[in-house]
Every structure is written in structure tokens, then in C-alpha cells.
Image (cartoon, helix red, strand yellow):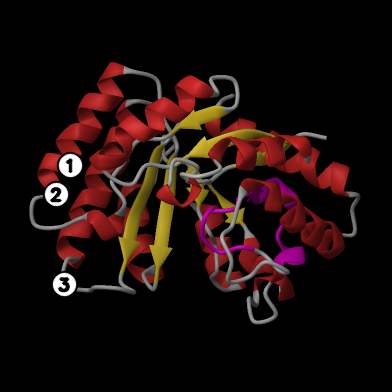
């Protein structure tokens, strides 16, 4: 069984003391592919070091996280451009709009999102979208940019059934993680109406740990709990869930 964690911040300071053990635990339960989203330039060296240590398991993205879009975001975007020109990445992400913490940089977040979508198209890469309290704003820009070159993953999808169908209409897979195991997560009530071909698995480690670890540090081995929940929802063996969602991840990332 091969599971794919399509979104995990394994370079995070949260894993400073036991990173190798965390990765070993994940591999032991079948997680063999780890896709690593960027945040900003301060984490680039740590991401590269992670890939150098695990070259066969770690696949890096490049991008500027929306909560790190501030007044001088153009400098950060120049770093993104330079890195995309220098080496292989597997997606532009995570990018998008986050209005949960701070609405004052909405215009800058919108501009950064548009620019990074264009960069993804230039490099023929998928995008990985971060959306928090910003579905309307995200969809408006996807509508502007939609074409055959726009595709990717709607990371940590927590919207409604209607929003799920809309995201899929823009050639996005839905990234499903620990929230699907929460009693108040809601997406478990309609997910069975979304064909599995549109689903990929993720942890967003160290954030959003699934039950029974909710509130604790998340890690990629916990992807097994997400897969088990989907096994219940879709009434399929966990091996089939792993096979289909990993195949879906290959369709997005090209590897």
C-alpha cells in the first residue's frame, strides 16, 4: 500500500527534535510520497535540506503563502521566480487568500495569487491553493484565470458541497485531511457525493491533526487515520483508497 501525503510541512520547527523519527513512522505505515509546500524565502534552505536528505520521498513546491504577503511581497515573489528558474519543483504552492487573520492585505494577496498562477502556467506546474474565509475571492480569480493550463489542488478543503463542485470545475482536486475526522468538520456529511477521482489525501502537518490526536502536533503517519475515514465514507478497502488517491496525486504532480 502506497499512501501520498500531498501537503506536509516536514521542515517546520515543530519537527526539529525528531524529524527523522517522524518520517520513519510515516514510511512504516505506507506513506512513501511527501509533497512539501513553501511558505516564504526564510524556509527555502530547510526545504532543500529536507529533500537532500530524502531525495526519493520528498517533492518540493515553491510559492509565497498568503499570510506572508505583506507590503514588500514583490521581493518574496522575486525569490519564487528565481527558484522556479533554477531547479525542479512540483507545484507552485501554497498560494491563495487568507482573510481569517488579517483582511488588510487583501489587495496584495489577490495580486500575489494572480502572479503566482501565471508563474505556474509558465512552468507548466499545478497550483496548491490555501483558502481560509476567502472562497468568493479565490473563485473570482480562478474564473479570471481558467483555461486548460490551470489545474492543481484545493488544499485543506473545508467548504460546502456546492463549493466543492465549483473547485472541481476549475480542474482542482480536493485535498482532504484531518478535518474529515472531526465531529464538526461537516465535509464528511457530503464527501461521498464527490467521486474519489477528485480527492487527494494530506495532513498539513504539523497542523490539523485528525482524531484521536486533535489538538496535538500532526505528523504524516496520521494520514492513515484520514485514509481510514475515507474508507468508511466510500465503503472501500483502505488499500483501494490509497491506490486511487495516490494515482490522483500522480495526475496532478506528474510523478
Is residue 3 shown above or below 105? above
Task: Tell me residue 143's x, y (percent).
Answer: 36, 55
Task: Tell me residue 251's x, y (percent).
Answer: 61, 32
Q: Which residues are magenta?
A: 191-209
Viewed as shown, does residue 43 lie left or right of 61? left
The first of marks 1 and 3 along the sequence is 1
Q: Residue at x 22, y 58 (%)?
A: 109
Q: Which residue is mark 1?
A: 76
Q: Which residue is mark 3?
A: 104
Q: Residue at x 21, y 25 (%)?
A: 82
Task: Tell me residue 78's x, y (percent).
Answer: 15, 34
Task: Tell me residue 118's x, y (percent).
Answer: 27, 38
As helix, strand or loop, the secondary structure at mark 2 comes to helix
Is residue 18 shown above or below 224? above
Q: Residue at x 28, y 60 (%)?
A: 67
Label 1: how many residues lie within 10 Å, few (<14), some (14-19) or many (20+)?
Answer: some
Mark 2 in CB contact with mark 3 (< 8 angstroms): no
Q: Residue at the bottom extreme?
A: 184
- Asked which quadrant contains residue 104, the reply is bottom left
The first of marks 2 and 3 along the sequence is 2
Mark 1 in CB contact with mark 2 (< 8 angstroms): yes
Q: How far is mark 2 from mark 3, CA to CA?
A: 14 Å
Is residue 189 shown above or below 153? below
Quarter holding the C terminus? top right
Q: Nearer the viewer, residue 13 or 250?
A: 13
Quarter holding the N terminus? top right
Q: Which residue is mark 2?
A: 73
Amino acid at each position: 500500500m502506497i499512501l501520498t501525503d500531498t501537503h506536509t510541512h516536514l521542515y517546520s520547527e515543530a519537527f526539529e527534535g525528531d524529524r527523522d523519527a517522524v518520517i520513519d513512522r510515516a514510511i512504516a505505515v505506507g506513506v512513501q510520497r511527501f509533497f512539501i509546500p513553501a511558505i516564504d524565502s526564510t524556509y527555502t534552505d530547510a526545504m532543500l535540506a529536507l529533500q537532500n536528505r530524502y531525495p526519493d520521498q520528498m517533492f518540493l513546491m515553491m510559492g509565497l503563502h498568503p499570510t506572508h504577503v505583506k507590503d514588500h511581497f514583490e521581493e518574496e515573489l522575486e525569490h519564487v521566480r528565481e527558484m522556479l528558474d533554477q531547479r525542479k519543483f512540483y507545484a507552485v504552492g501554497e498560494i491563495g487568500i487568507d482573510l481569517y487573520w488579517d483582511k488588510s492585505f487583501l489587495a496584495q494577496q489577490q495580486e500575489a495569487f494572480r502572479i503566482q498562477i501565471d508563474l505556474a502556467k509558465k512552468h507548466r506546474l499545478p497550483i496548491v491553493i490555501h483558502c481560509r474565509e476567502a472562497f468568493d475571492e479565490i473563485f473570482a480569480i480562478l474564473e479570471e484565470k481558467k483555461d486548460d493550463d490551470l489545474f492543481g489542488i484545493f488544499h485543506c478543503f473545508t467548504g460546502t458541497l456546492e463549493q466543492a463542485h465549483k473547485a472541481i470545475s476549475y480542474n482542482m482536486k480536493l485535498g482532504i485531511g484531518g478535518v474529515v475526522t472531526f465531529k464538526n468538520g461537516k465535509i464528511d456529511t457530503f464527501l461521498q457525493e464527490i467521486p474519489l477521482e477528485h480527492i487527494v489525501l494530506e495532513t498539513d502537518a504539523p497542523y490539523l491533526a485528525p482524531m484521536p490526536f486533535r489538538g496535538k502536533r500532526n505528523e504524516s503517519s496520521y494520514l492513515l487515520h484520514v485514509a481510514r475515514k475515507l474508507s468508511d465514507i466510500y465503503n472501500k478497502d483502505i488499500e483501494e483508497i490509497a491506490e486511487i488517491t495516490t494515482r490522483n496525486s500522480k495526475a496532478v504532480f506528474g510523478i
